[in-house]
Image (tube, rainbow, N blue to C red):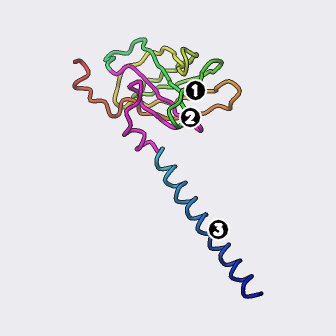
Amino acid sequence: MTERKTTVHSTIRSAATLALAFAMAFGALSAKAHDNAYLDTLKAPNGGQVRMAGNYHYELVVVKNSKEVKENPVQVFVTDHAGEKIATAGAAGHVTLLAGKLKASVTLAPDGDNRLKGMAKYASRPDMKAVVSITLAGKPPEQARFTPLAGVNHQHMEH
C-alpha cells in the first residue's frame, strides 16, 4: 500500500509540475503576443497606433501630415484584447504629446461608441511621443505610452 501511495503522489506531483510548466509557457506567449513590437505589426482599425493599457487596447490616432503647429484632433479608440469595442460613455481621458521641445495637453471626452476625442496644438513629427490616460466609468485609470508617428514615412505624406 505504501508503495502505491508513493506512486500516486509522484504522479500527482508530476501532473502538477507539467500543468505549471504549460501555464508558464502559455503566459509567456500571451505576454509576448501583446507587447509593443507585436502590436506594431498589426494594422490598426483606425490608422493609429495600438498599445495595451491594463485589460484594454488603446488606439491613438493623430494627424500625420500637419507640418506646422496648429489645432489638430487627437482620438483614442478603446477595445478589449479581442478587438471588441468598449463603450466610452462616462469616460474621461488625458493625452500629453511631446515632440522636441513642444508639449501639448489634451482633455479627451467621449465621442461615439468606443472613441474619446480632443483637440491640441501640435505638428506631425516622427519623434512625437504620447502618454494616454483614460478612466472608464466605474473603472480605475489605465495608461499607455505611444510613438504614434515613428513608423510613418514623412516623405510621402503629401500625396
From the image, state whether disc 3 or disc 2 is nearer to you. 3
Other-residue count near label 3 (Cα within 10 Å), few / some / many at <14 / 14–19 / ≥20: few
The kind of secondary structure element at disc 2 is strand
For discs 2 and 1, the disc positioned in front in the rendered view: 1
**Label 1 residue SS:** loop
Quarter of the picture containing the N terminus is bottom right
Q: Amino acid at mark 2?
A: Tyr
Place of residue 52 in the rendered image (x, y in percent of width and height, measured from the top left): 52, 38
Residue labelled with disc 1: 86
As drawn, which residue projects farthest toward the right?
Answer: 1
* Viewer-closest of 150 and 122: 150
The answer to whether marks 2 and 1 mark residues whose Cβ atoms lie closer than 8 Å is yes
Kindly state the secondary structure of the residue where label 3 is placed: helix
For disc 2, the marked residue is 56
Q: As rendered, which of 97 and 49 lies closer to the eye?
A: 49
Q: Seen in the image, is 103 located left or right of residue 87? A: left
Q: Which mark is residue 125?
A: none
How many residues crowd around disc 2 within 10 Å: few (fewer than 14), some, or many (20 or more)?
many
Q: Quadrant of the C terminus?
A: top left
Report if residue 7 lies within the magenta region. no
Q: Tag 1 or tag 2, which sits nearer the N-term?
A: 2
Marks 3, 1: nearer the viewer: 3
Q: In x, y percent, where is residue 70?
A: 39, 12
Type of amino acid at the residue the image marks with label 3 = Ala
Q: Residue 6 at x, y = what percent?
A: 72, 83
Q: Is residue 142 left or right of residue 120?
A: right
Q: Are marks 3 and 1 in contact (CB under 8 Å)?
A: no
